[in-house]
Image (cartoon, grey):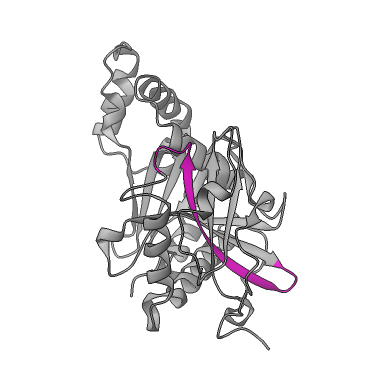
């Protein structure tokens, strides 16, 4: 089973390359960026797009960077100002210090591309994960776009978060909706509920245990990189996972509009949080049903 997170060999390489650590530290402090941890690589997000991908390759004793060339494909904006940057990208530089120096230029060309190709939902997603952290509430965003294992057709989970309740932690799978256009159909409320409950209810290592282990490994990696301060919770402190439907830009929104699309009897705790703007806080969530929250099988009595 492959989990997101860095291996010990990756951490040893980072210790040997101070510019890599400086780059991670810089984007970690940058209010416009968010760092996503993958399997031995990281994605630095800006406005919901990939500012750069950095893969750590201990066997080759190097790191490899990638910037998506699509951002240079501009139709309305003159491309000439970005020619030197494009040529530098095409040269295949893997020097961390150079990537650190080029961050502002990379943002500028992405701004130009987003001006022509708005990606509102992705931008909202990044705002939400940056806003929902332990420093401002009871939730900590851990990951985005986590694929459901063993089922490529099931797609990805928008946000994985954790809610802290005393000494216990509840994994929360968050589905984002901007407005109500995608409430129904193949990617609608009911379809998502069925997909996530099927995933969480699997026995063995592919269901809820996979989710908890993924959270712990990403958390451990971010802590060692200085991106999270809190200690990694023990497996025994995790309670049963929940779901949340988070809807932005819904001016007349009421939880009943989501509840009526779900089964009469829910087998998971489901919350909904609604915002009329593109800013949203998980702590404002409401239970759809006052159902009992059973503890995770491995949690303490």
The relative height of residue 185 versus residue 58 in the rendered view (above or below) is above
Quick check: 157 left or right of 60? right
Magenta stretch bounds:
165-182
Quick check: 216 left or right of 91? right
Image coordinates for residue 54, horizontal then vertical, percent: 38, 49
Residue closest to the eye, 297 or 75? 297
Q: Which corner quadrant of the image does residue 51 belong to?
A: top left
Quadrant of the frame with the C terminus: bottom right
Is 133 within the magenta? no
> Furthest-right residue in view?
166
> Furthest-bottom residue in view?
301
Residue closest to the eye, 276 or 290? 290
The relative height of residue 113 versus residue 175 in the rendered view (above or below) is above
Residue closest to the eye, 175 or 261? 261
Q: Is residue 26 visible?
A: no
Residue drawn where x is 45% and y is 44% of the image: 44
Image coordinates for residue 93, horizontal then vertical, percent: 31, 39
Residue drawn where x is 33% and y is 12% of the image: 77
Image coordinates for residue 113, horizontal then vertical, percent: 35, 23
The relative height of residue 178 versus residue 3 in the rendered view (above or below) is above
Quadrant of the frame with the N terminus: bottom left
Magenta segment main secondary structure: strand
Q: Is residue 254 visible?
A: yes
Quick check: 274 left or right of 138? left
Image coordinates for residue 101, horizontal then vertical, percent: 47, 32
Residue drawn where x is 59% and y is 34% of the image: 252
How many dots with numbers? 0
Residue closest to the eye, 210 or 62? 210
């Amino acid at each position: 089973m492959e989990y997101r997170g860095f291996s010990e060999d990756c951490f040893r390489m980072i210790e040997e390359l101070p510019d890599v650590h400086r780059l991670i530290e810089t984007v970690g402090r940058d209010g416009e960026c968010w760092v996503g941890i993958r399997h031995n690589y990281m994605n630095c997000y800006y406005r919901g797009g990939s500012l750069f991908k950095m893969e750590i390759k201990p066997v080759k004793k190097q790191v490899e960077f990638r910037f998506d060339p699509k951002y240079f494909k501009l139709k309305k904006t003159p491309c000439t100002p970005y020619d030197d940057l494009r040529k530098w990208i095409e040269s295949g530089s893997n020097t961390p210090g150079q990537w650190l120096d080029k961050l502002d230029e990379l943002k500028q060309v992405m701004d130009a591309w987003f001006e022509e190709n708005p990606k509102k939902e992705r931008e909202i997603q990044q705002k939400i994960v940056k806003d929902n952290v332990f420093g401002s509430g009871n939730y900590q965003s851990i990951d985005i776009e986590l694929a459901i294992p063993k089922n490529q057709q099931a797609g990805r989970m928008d946000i994985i978060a954790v809610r802290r309740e005393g000494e216990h932690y509840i994994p929360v799978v968050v589905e984002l909706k901007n407005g109500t256009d995608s409430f129904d159909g193949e990617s609608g409320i009911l379809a998502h509920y069925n997909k996530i409950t099927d995933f969480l209810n699997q026995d063995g290592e592919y269901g809820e245990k996979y989710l908890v282990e993924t959270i712990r490994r990403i958390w451990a990696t971010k802590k060692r990189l200085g991106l999270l301060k809190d200690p990694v919770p023990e497996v025994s402190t995790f309670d049963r996972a929940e779901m949340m439907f988070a809807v932005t830009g819904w001016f007349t929104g009421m939880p009943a509009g989501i509840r009526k699309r779900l089964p009469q009897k829910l087998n998971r705790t489901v919350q909904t949080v609604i915002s009329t703007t593109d800013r949203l806080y998980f702590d404002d969530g409401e239970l759809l049903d006052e159902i009992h929250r059973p503890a995770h099988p491995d949690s303490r009595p």
